[in-house]
Image (spheres, rainbow, N blue to C red):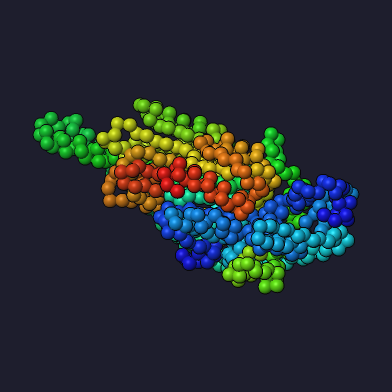
Amino acid sequence: MNRELRLKLGVEVEEVPGLQLEDLLTVGSKIFYQTHFYPLVKMQNNVREIYLVFKGVNGQIPALLNVEVKKSNDQVEILCGGMEISKRNKYEKELLAAKKQAENALLHNAELREAKNKLLKNQSLLEFQLREVNLLKEQQQEIFRLIAHDLQEPLRKTIFMSNYILNTTTELSSGTEERVRKIINYNIKMREMLLMLLRFKELEGRNLEYTSINLSDLVSSAVKSLMIDNKDSIILTCPNTCISLKGDYKLLKNLFVALIRNSQNEQHANKDRLLININAFVTVKNNNFQIKDHYQYKKFVKITYTDNSKGYSSKLNKIIQKSEDLNKVNIGLAYSAQVVDKHNGAMEAASLNGKGVNYTIFLPIDPDLKN
Amino acid sequence: MTSEIINRNNVKVLGEGEKTILFAHGFGCDQNMWRFVTPAFEKNYKIVLFDYVGCGNSDLSAYVPDRYSELQGYAQDILEICSTLNLENVIFVGHSVSCMIGLLADMENQHLFSSLIFIGPSARYVNDMDYLGGFSKEDLEGLLEVMDNNYLGWASFLAPVVMKNEDKPELTKELEVSFCSTDPIITRNFAEVTFFSDNRDDLANLTKPCLVLQCSDDAIAPDEVGQYIHEQIKGSTFEKMNATGHCPHLSHPTETIRLMKKFLKSQYHFS
């Protein structure tokens, strides 16, 4: 180390051996030394024009460094030369600031232009889609009106008539009586499903009532309302024990009720205990689920729901299946997915036959209430 | 789609084994950082190397500022690479900020990694109440200033003049275009995302076997930080290295390899 540098750094000649270059630097420069400077020297055996700042006796000393590593048979010699650039640096800093300002303005401008183009393009698309959605909505409303009133009534009457036959006719053969009871059961099942469908439909028009919700409380209250015999059969684990979020308490409770009810319906006959595992943690996730290449990060609760039921392969958006039992399960699922959707969240399902279900639910911690 | 991601992240697959090790480079350079370590694993493992978008030889045009405004965006890179290559039961090896990126990737897809090796991890660089990260806000602003004044980004143009690899001529060509020569604006953004990140609350979510390699005298991830990470990740293994500095895979590859193999042996009964 030459005299000039020793004076500037306040280092005596005898102190020099054993000094580490990085210890002479400001903290910011020390990081850069570790992340860039050292790897470069190590792999290239030389670097040129690297800017580092030394801790001087009278304040910071910005310098440009060149390093050359000389390897001979059994010796490594590191030569380092530098030049103080305080004055030049002041000027350069101003240049950099101006450059950054110009770049930001340019970037901002480019972003604005791109946004404008996108907006124009999306507007016409939106118009078209809105028209289509409105048409679909009208049709759907018609169908649901049919379900709500016109189908309920004949069902109610069939059940009433069948009961009447059972109660008033004394000489029914046992075979006939059994069949009439089956008719009643079928009709009751159908009415249950219709009610579920209606509940599903009602969700659409519902405005959410946001309150602050503690997730553990929510799940336990859902479990309680189901009156499950063996309370030990549901396991809830949260690594960060106290997770709270804003949401509609009633709907979110219904969501867990629907999921747990599904698990019960699909319970393995040969397994005596239904095990449900609900796990949750907070994570940051891109808020844009649909639009590609668009990123806006937000805090979400990630809930994973697994059980040891039979499991079935089904897609969330598919309500109608061939088997009646599956239909019941799927309406419950579709209901759950819709609740999540209403909260601006996302729900994914993975289920393997025989291995139980595996749902992943993302709910925003603090949803944008304007939506 | 397949080749799109491979090109975008400059993905390289080598090695003769079946089990996969994914090496994720830290802030500063690119996959070249692993070159002294990977040869020791080539015989028994499949090795996957890559550059994050915005680093090394990645496709800079794929850099979407919003996406990479959080470490989650970088975790997406890892998830997309793994799904493109159909990887599972991966051994994840991350250096520096990549440790937390790997943790975030694991939180998003828990079926991907079978174990994780963290080299010089930190969950938060800025000091906080009851937490010593090692840096004050002013320190990190000093780093950003140093970065602004270094024109490594321009090195790609000057490479033939500046870089002379006399003893390893075969490297020169590669270095011309790649080594540490990153886009200055992207690198600055990466620095900000890295050094102002806070992943302390995420640590408890890691339940896989995890090795924490802590260097001696690491100016970037001090002893306290590594110890903190070890305490927060239940069941993790902590190894204090003799290696000094922040890049033991560059400065002390032999010790790094030995400790990695020791951990792998304890997990998979072969190394």
- Position in image of residue B157 (x %, y %): 69, 72
Q: Quadrant of residue B87?
A: bottom left
State whether residue B215 is above or below residue B51. above
Outermost residue, front direction?
A73
Q: Is residue A30 above or below residue B165?
A: above
Q: Position of residue A184 (x, y in %)?
A: 23, 38
Please determine whether, in this image, residue A152 is positioned above or below residue B186: above
Q: Residue at x 29, y 31 (%)?
A: A272
In this rendered view, identify the residue nearer to me: B166 or A159: B166
Asked if residue A361 lies left or right of residue A50, the reply is left
Q: How many marks?
A: 0
Q: Is residue B172 visible?
A: yes
Residue shown at 10% from the left, 31% from the top:
A171
- Is A364 on the left or on the right of A348, as rendered? right
- Of residues B84 and A371, the one nearer the viewer is B84
Q: Residue at x 29, y 40 (%)?
A: A189
Left or right of B24 in this view: A310: left
Q: Residue at x 65, y 46 (%)?
A: B244
Question: Which one is nearer the viewer's eye here, A150 or A314?
Answer: A314
Q: Can residue A370 be seen from the camera position used here? A: no
> In the depicted view, which residue is nearer to us: A133 or B126?
B126
Q: Find residue A93 and report its horizontal and vertical position in percent.
A: 82, 61
x and y, in percent, of residue A16 in the image: 81, 49
